[in-house]
Image (cartoon, rainbow, N blue to C red):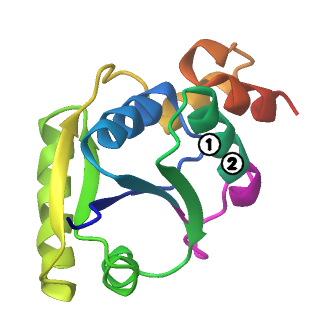
Amino acid sequence: MNHRIALYAGSFDPYTNGHHAIVRKAAALFDEVVVMIAVNIAKTRAFDAEAMAEAIRAAAEADGLSNVRVVTHGGLVADFCAENGIRWYVRGLRNNMDYNYEENLAQINHLINPALESIYLRSDDPAISSSMIRELMAFGKPVAAFVPAPVAALLRE
């Protein structure tokens, strides 16, 4: 039997309950889920990528998701998948705008890595986004209800 590995990538700046719900769904479908914090050197992160990776690991562990691995990576997703034998790229969809954006990415990724298949999972709470969390924080609003507990602890630091 083939080991079915899926990748779920994003900036996760910060990682939200919405992201975590997608990871839980993917973990139920695949033998292994690699959560990749995609680091773009041209963008300034609000939160340290390695610290966020540790918080995501802690959130996965707290939920008993033993088949979830967290990495950071600064290259192309399609190349990472080819180099690591990953055939499925999980993406979360909140709305039709996400779908249109993701379809363009899927086509580009498929050109780079024809073996890579994009899998879309529906969001349980389409209102939650990393940008929403950052905006609420900028105005001093509490955000612990929108992120896993280990991420909330990181955000309080």
**Image quarter hosting the C terminus:** top right
Above or below: residue 19 compared with residue 32:
above
Q: Residues within 10 Å of mark 2 (few under 14, many from 20)?
A: many
What residue appears at the point 26 percent right and 61 percent down from the top-left corner? 4
Q: The N terminus lies in which quarter of the figure?
A: bottom left
Write down the residue under mark 2.
Answer: 52
State the separation of the CA atoms marked 1 and 2: 6 Å
Contact between labelled residues 2 and 1, with CB atoms less than 8 Å apart = yes
Residue 86: x %, y % from top left: 31, 71
Q: Nearer the viewer, residue 52 or 31?
A: 31
Mark 1 crowdedness (10 Å alpha carbons): few <14, some 14-19, many ≥20: many
- Location of residue 47 in the rendering, given as x and y in whole percent from the top left corner: 72, 49
Span of residues in magenta: 37-52
Q: Tell me residue 141's x, y (percent).
A: 69, 14
Residue 155 figure quarter: top right
Compared to 76, does 7 lie above or below?
Answer: above
Q: Main secondary structure of the magenta part?
A: loop
Q: Which residue is mark 1?
A: 56
Q: Amino acid at mark 1?
A: Ile
| 35 up-or-down from 138: above or below | below
Name which residue type carries label 2: Met
